Image (cartoon, grey):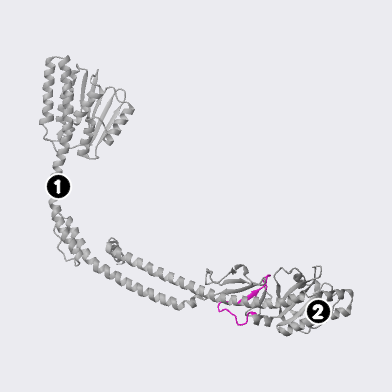
Amino acid sequence: MKTTFKKRMRQYFSDKSKSFIYKFAFFFFFCNMILIFGASAIFYKNTVQIILDSSYQYTYTIMEQARYNFDTYMTSHRAILNSIAENDILISASQCYERGDIDNTIKYETRIVDTIKSSRENHPDIHDIVIVMDNGLLVNRESGWGMNMEYPFPETEWYQNALRYDRNSPTNIFYMQTDFYKPYSSNQGESVVVISQPVYNYLQQKVGAVFYLISLDGFWTSVLNGYHSQYGDLVLTNQENKIIAHSKRGDEGQNFPHIEDAILIKDDTEPIKGNPAEPILLLLPSKTSACNVLCSINIDINKETSLLLQCIVLIVILFVAVNLFITLYISRNLNRPIHSLVTDMKGLAAADQKLLNGNYRYTELLFIANNFNLLLKDIKDLNDRQTEMQITLQKAKNQILISKINPHFLFNSLQLIQTENLYGSKEKTNSIILSLSNQLRYNIYDDSDDMVPLCRELERVSEYLHLCSEIFENNLDIKIDIPDSLMPCCIPKFTLHTLAENSIKHGFHGTPENGLIHISGKDLGAMMELSVEDNGTGISKERLAQIRSSLKNGTHPGIGLLNLTKQMEYFYGDNYRIDIQSNKAATCVTVRFPADRTNVN
């Protein structure tokens, strides 16, 4: 049962696959599905890109504002830092400290401490300002007094790092704890953002550094407070890729990971491409220092587009249902009348052709059926007339071929009579004329049939060859070796006669000496072979190749073999073969064609 059902379904779809209407319906449905799904995919992709672009615009605005606040903040504080680092009072205090001039040192230090305290009063976010000199002098807001050379400040990493920068370098900024001068300050363990600058003496030599300590809370409030992204955290890193401020706090002083994957941006018009399922890290450099503002775009596309996907799915389902309904409606309503018309037209292959008279529903199909009926009547009349014309045309073509052979034979025969009349006797001349009259009667008057029995053709050829033998003073022998089973078979008229004439004219060049013409045949059942062989001068290989080629393409200059080839094509189409073999002492022409044993006269 299952096998029968499968066969029926296979047969059904096989029949439908051959129908133009069903193919059209299938491709209509298939193309519409591709169009629907393609449009949905493009729409969804563009929507995702729009979400990504809007997220980028939003994030860029936040980063630009944070950069602006940072640059503005740094500009004001760097001015204070520069005024202290480049103050002559600091150099004078350092020199007095080295000379042991305690009074002047204290005087200068007091002025410096007053400057530090004044800066802190105007800027509450300043935690402290620490001055460290190579000679051991240390000044801050609390102590304001010198130190001995044994204090390890100059050997610390943060101090040596500060000396690597100069006036032309970006500001050195980093995050640290205030424990670095724990014995000399009451405020310990607080997180600060530090910016530093070297101190130069009058010889432009680095002799110390000023460390500007900003309260992390104050720095965070001024730069990052109130600015957060719904897609990612806002982070500020220094030139060493250390986090100096973080929107969520807690990661300051740590290395920022995956900085190599950050995308450097210049403005908000840059298109951002990436996989929305993975965070896209953006980097915006500061304009005042070697710091970077970083923020990631991490979008939950499924959440953002969940409603859109639901709408797309519903629209696709609706379009598929409508498209399927239209496809089935068109295919069923259009296929039925067309199938009826096709079925009626298939019946025209029968012998008794009837006119189309079905109800084909549509005006176009009725128009086709009516006009087809008119054409069918005209075709029947034309077929009858065409059959008669085809028979007449075939007879005319064959008569044209025969008309070309008759003058050729007559010309050769008259040449024989002329030769005998000049050089022979009257008796032989009369004999030649008698034989010629028999030949002409065979050629001219006995033309009721295009096909003649082999025995009749052989009789005329034998008479012709014996006549030639007498003319050539019996220098020509004739040998006939054809089985009796082939004698009743019909062959195209002048087949053997043409080959015999060619042997006389071309094989012996008209003057045979001890010449021999051997006519033979083979009964091959459905096929037969006739051969005419002479022991004449033969044909060279080059000339033989030319003859074969010219006969094949119809450009042979001679009459006999060319007309014989055309006769064979006329009667047998491609079911024949003419083979020419030759050497220095003999030439043999063989013709193979179907043995006609039915039309025997």
Q: Nearer the viewer, mark 2 or mark 1?
A: 2
Tell me what residue is drawn at x 27 percent, y 32 percent. Answer: 579
Residue 231 is covered by the magenta coloring: yes
- Give left or right: position of 198 versus 456: right
- Of mark 2 and mark 1, the one earlier in the sequence is 2
Three-letter residue code for mark 2? Val
Residue 225 occupies which quadrant of the picture? bottom right
Task: Name the outermost residue toward the right.
Answer: 100
- Give the residue number, with chain letter if any, for mark 1: 386
Q: What type is the residue that disc 1 sits on?
A: Gln
> On the rendered image, what quadrant is the N terminus found in?
bottom left
Q: Which residues are magenta?
A: 223-242
Q: Residues within 10 Å of mark 1 (few under 14, many from 20)?
A: few
* Image position of 528 (left or right of 389): right
Residue in the foreground of this view, choosing between 601 and 473 = 473
Residue under numbered circle 2: 139
Residue 23 position, x and y percent, is 30, 63
Q: Quadrant of residue 460?
A: top left
